[in-house]
Amino acid sequence: MPAFDPYHQWLGVPATERMLNEAARARVTLLNVDQKVAYDNQLRKSLPAATGFLSPSNTEVLTAEIDRLREQQQNLEQQLGQEQESFQRLMARQTEEQETIV
């Protein structure tokens, strides 16, 4: 029987474990220099091709995208911390309830 996930079943929030795994993968990718370079290159390829050099407007676009991604990473890390705290509280309650039953 799968574990009860109140966030998913009651609030419709995606499975907590899946969200934690995605945030952890993003963190590992962005903190590992080689993986971050590969990720940055992938992002650059997805942007419109430059005309052989980075014009000021392209630089501004890339800078804005980097800032947006950093903010997104901070939000994900904050959300991950909150999810971990909630998960720990739920596990503590479950342990208490199990001890009460025994």
Image (cartoon, rainbow, N blue to C red):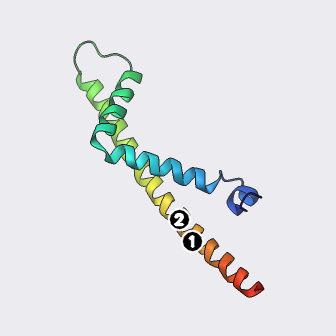
Which amino acid, by three-letter code, is at mark 1? Gln
**Circle 1/circle 2 CB separation < 8 Å:** yes
Sort mark 2 into few (<14), some (14-19) or many (20+) by Cα contacts within 10 Å: some
Farthest top residue?
A: 51
Relative depth, front residue between 72 and 4: 4
Place of residue 69 in the rendered image (x, y in percent of width and height, measured from the top left):
39, 42
Q: Residue at x 37, y 34 (%)?
A: 39
The location of residue 50, given as percent across then percent down, is 30, 16
Residue drawn at (59%, 50%) of the image: 18
Q: In the image, what residue occupies the spot 33% across and 28% down?
A: 41
Measured as percent of width and height from the top left, residue 57 is found at 28, 25
Q: Is residue 67 left or right of residue 15?
A: left
Q: Which secondary structure, mark 1? A: helix
84 or 76: nearer the viewer: 84
In the rendered image, the vertical position of residue 96 relative to residue 81, given as above or below? below
For mark 1, what is the residue?
Answer: 88
Between marks 1 and 2, how big is the CA–CA gap?
6 Å
Q: Which residue corresponds to the image point at 43% horizontal and 45% vertical from the top-left?
A: 26
Residue 85 versus residue 62 in the image, above or below:
below
The residue at which mark 2 appears reads as 84
Q: Which mark is residue 4?
A: none
Query: Which quadrant is the N terminus positioned in?
Result: bottom right
